[in-house]
Image (cartoon, rainbow, N blue to C red):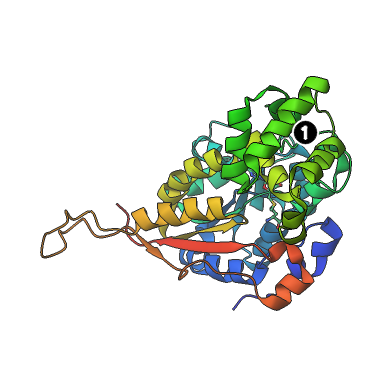
């Protein structure tokens, strides 16, 4: 068994983001890593502070990790943290559904990274030993006030994980139609009062465009009835989540990356997805359910050779964090973890 009291355990606090379910994630990825031995490469599709990756690199001395993050700040900090592992780590600043291009050598590694060619050659030859997607935003992103992710401070309504491109949350509030705003709040935020909030936003932006979060939070306090405010958590929580998902096209990226990841796995390789909201988890669950099916036409009395399922579920349902982990790290409360393993080549 790996030494679970490695660097990831000791240092997580220093880096502002405590990795969720660190030991369980390691345990889920371990069989793929051991099966590929000296050739094992894992993709960390959501590098963040590099907490999971640091632990994996410290635990398995032959392992290499390809780390992806669309957030330049996150990537730079993680690269510094992972520098002691030398060329066993390579980082790319991309949205994670660029994974296929990264593996095909079509994307340059980040400025701080070493040459990726040897690691990519290993993947081309053997496939991936594992992949990890710890979705959503990191604690550092929530803490960087000027990014606009947090609703408890007045800050510019930005919310882009990649601050160099795309629309901001303010753009959505100031330009989307009433119908589109209501749809986003209802679908991505599960907001019961989506129509009412959208009407208030459209009314308010006629007075002056939205620029900072304080005014939106105030509007939400007014638009959500007092009775619901008492039971439904912070009134801004669902709207902020919905805007973040739309700004970053989070669900589209997830839908795209699932097939790329599974196809890139070696036999015995495993993919772990950690979702923090029900829409993400539903997308992962649905994709995995398709993948573990046989392709033998229904109605035939026996499995046709070569049509057996290529993947198997490792987790039964979605796994959650324990009460004690949630107590230590409240960010772990909503997590739902699912893991799949490739069991046949084609
Ligand atoms: C929850 S944090 C990951 C924390 C990490 N596992 C750790 O232990 O430090 C998620 C990270 O993934 C990045 N991210 C989220 N969605 C992404 C996407 N579609 N493409 C690339 N990076 C993404 C965010 O910028 C953030 O830094």
Q: Residue at x 51, y 62 (%)?
A: 338
Percent x, y of residue 145:
87, 42
Q: Residue at x 80, y 28 (%)?
A: 210
Rendered position, 273 above or below 194: below
Left or right of 338: which side holds 92? right
State the image quarter where residue 109 is shown: top right
Q: Quadrant of the N terminus?
A: bottom right
Ligand 1 closer than 8 Å to the CB at disc 1? no
Left or right of 85: which side holds 26? left
Helix, strand or loop at label 1? It is loop
Left or right of 305: which side holds 163? right
Q: Residue at x 79, y 27 (%)?
A: 204
Rendered position, 151 above or below 278: above
Percent x, y of residue 52:
67, 60
Percent x, y of residue 253:
55, 40
Q: Residue at x 53, y 61 (%)?
A: 38
State the image quarter where residue 278 is shown: bottom right
Residue sitting nearer the eye, 47 or 160: 160
Residue 19 can be seen, yes or no? no
Residue sitting nearer the eye, 342 or 303: 303
Percent x, y of residue 285:
45, 57
Q: Which residue lies under the disc numbered 1?
A: 158
Q: Residues within 10 Å of mark 1 (few under 14, many from 20)?
A: many
Residue 72 can be seen, yes or no? yes
């Amino acid at each position: 068994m790996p030494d679970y009291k490695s660097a990831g355990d000791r240092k997580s606090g220093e880096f502002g983001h405590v990795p969720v379910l660190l030991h369980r994630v390691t345990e889920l990825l371990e069989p793929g890593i051991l099966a590929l031995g000296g050739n094992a490469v894992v993709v960390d599709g959501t590098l963040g502070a590099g907490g999971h990756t640091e632990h994996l690199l410290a635990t398995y001395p032959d392992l290499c990790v390809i780390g992806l993050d669309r957030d330049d700040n996150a990537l730079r900090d993680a690269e510094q943290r992972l520098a002691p592992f030398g060329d066993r780590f390579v980082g790319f600043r991309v949205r994670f559904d660029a994974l296929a291009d990264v593996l095909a050598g079509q994307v340059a590694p980040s400025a701080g990274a070493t040459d990726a060619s040897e690691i990519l050659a290993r993947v081309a030859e053997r496939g991936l030993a594992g992949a990890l997607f710890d979705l959503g935003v990191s604690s550092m992103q929530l803490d960087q006030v000027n990014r606009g992710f947090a609703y408890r401070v007045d800050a510019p309504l930005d919310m882009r994980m990649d601050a160099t491109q795309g629309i901001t949350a303010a753009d959505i509030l100031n330009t989307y139609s009433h119908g589109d705003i209501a749809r986003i709040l209802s679908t991505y935020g599960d907001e019961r009062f989506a129509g009412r909030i959208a009407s208030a936003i459209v009314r308010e932006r006629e007075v002056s465009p939205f620029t900072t979060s304080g005014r939106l939070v105030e509007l939400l306090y007014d638009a959500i009835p007092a009775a619901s405010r008492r039971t439904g958590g912070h009134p801004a929580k669902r709207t902020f989540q919905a805007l973040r998902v739309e700004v970053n096209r989070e669900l589209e990226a997830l839908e795209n990356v699932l097939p790329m990841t599974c196809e890139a796995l070696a036999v015995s390789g495993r993919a772990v997805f950690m979702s923090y909201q029900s829409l993400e988890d539903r997308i992962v669950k649905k994709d995995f359910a398709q993948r573990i099916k046989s392709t033998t036409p229904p109605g035939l009395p026996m499995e046709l050779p070569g049509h057996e399922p290529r993947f198997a579920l490792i987790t039964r349902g979605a796994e959650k964090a324990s009460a004690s982990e949630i107590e230590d790290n409240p960010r772990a409360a909503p997590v739902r973890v699912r893991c799949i393993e490739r069991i046949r080549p084609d």
